[in-house]
Amino acid sequence: MSPTILKLGGSVITEKDRAETLDGAALDAAADAIAAAMEGGDVSELVLVHGGGSFGHHHASEAGVTTTDESGDAADAIAIHSAMKTLNQFVLSRLHDRGVPALPVHPLSAGARDADGDLDLPMNQAATMLHEGFVPVLHGDVIATEGEGVTVLSGDEIVTTAAAHLSADRVGLCSTVPGVLDTDEEVIPEITAFADAADALGGSDADADVTGGMAAKVRELLDLGAPASVFGPESIGAFLAGEQPGTTIRGR
Ligand code: IP8
């Protein structure tokens, strides 16, 4: 099995500046492209992951929880997790409306981090779902972390973990920008080392993003065993059809 993994960035499917606000038109367009690709046979085994946008990041920043700053308060964990489940339900229902057999996988209930910050996120449920013809839909979440309570688990970390466990052969990250941009705002076609893009990679463009923006994405994708593409929403169909839109990141 070598599935395709596609992450829908939280900034793509939500209005990132307004708490818990969906970008319904953008989500519809993404769901249309996914449904068309599955119906047309462009992709048969697909794992979807989505980010937090104004759902997860809003509550995470209110609670001061990041991938490294923890909370031991169940109310904080529930606020973040519930918002992510709400967003996940929106994603699922737009996919179901188009006949995509999507099923949720909630990381809080599935995995944990150890005291060194290493993630253990089993993927046997996603593998079996794929085998049975379903489309697992995972999402950024909070995750129990040894010695710390809970921390944030970003969708990008889920993508890299899922890619390794499921031996994905293609990974796509749909972002609000058409690729990783250089200092002239042009798309960098290929990145094979962080230094290729270091000048252009600052932090995130939105303060409420607690998981590090494009620089963190590139670092994580360079560690993948599969080539990854970073592209804008208009290129979801092209990516699923086997093209390499935007920036291709190949670490090894
Ligand atoms: O948007 C973070 O996921 P990301 C999810 O992929 C939360 O970084 C809970 C903030």
Image (cartoon, rainbow, N blue to C red):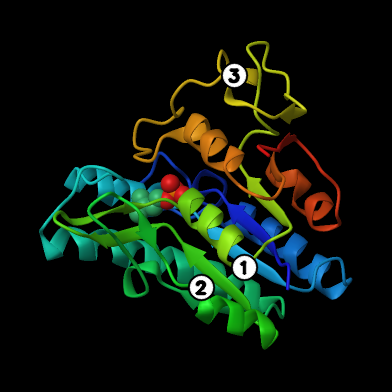
Label 2 residue near ligand 1, CB within 8 Å: no
Are the residues tagged 2 and 1 within 8 Å (C-beta)? Answer: yes
Helix, strand or loop under label 1: loop
Checking the image for residue 213, the label placed there is none
- Residue lying at 85% horizontally and 54% vertically, measured from the top left: 242
Disc 1 residue lies near ligand 1 with CB under 8 A? no
Query: Where does the image place residue 95, in percent across and percent down from the top left?
Result: 64, 72
Q: Which mark is residue 195?
A: 3
Looking at the picture, which amino acid does disc 2 mark?
Met
Which of these two is toward me, 25 or 78? Answer: 78
Residue 10 visible to the viewer: yes
User: Where the N terminus falls, by quadrant?
Assistant: bottom right
Look at mark 1 in the image and give the residue it sits on: 166
Residue 50 at x, y = what percent?
52, 57
Q: First in sequence: mark 3 or mark 1?
A: 1
Q: Say which quarter of the image contains residue 37.
A: bottom right
Mark 3 residue element? helix
The picture places residue 94, in percent across and down from the top left corner, at 61, 70
Give the residue number, with chain letter if any, for mark 2.
123
Q: Earlier in the sequence, mark 3 or mark 2?
A: 2
Cα separation, mark 3 vs mark 1, equals 29 Å
What amino acid is labelled 3 in the image?
Ala
The residue nearer to you, when weighing 222 against 138, is: 222
Residue 202's place in the image compared with 214, above or below, is above
What residue do we see at 42% from left, 31% from top?
206
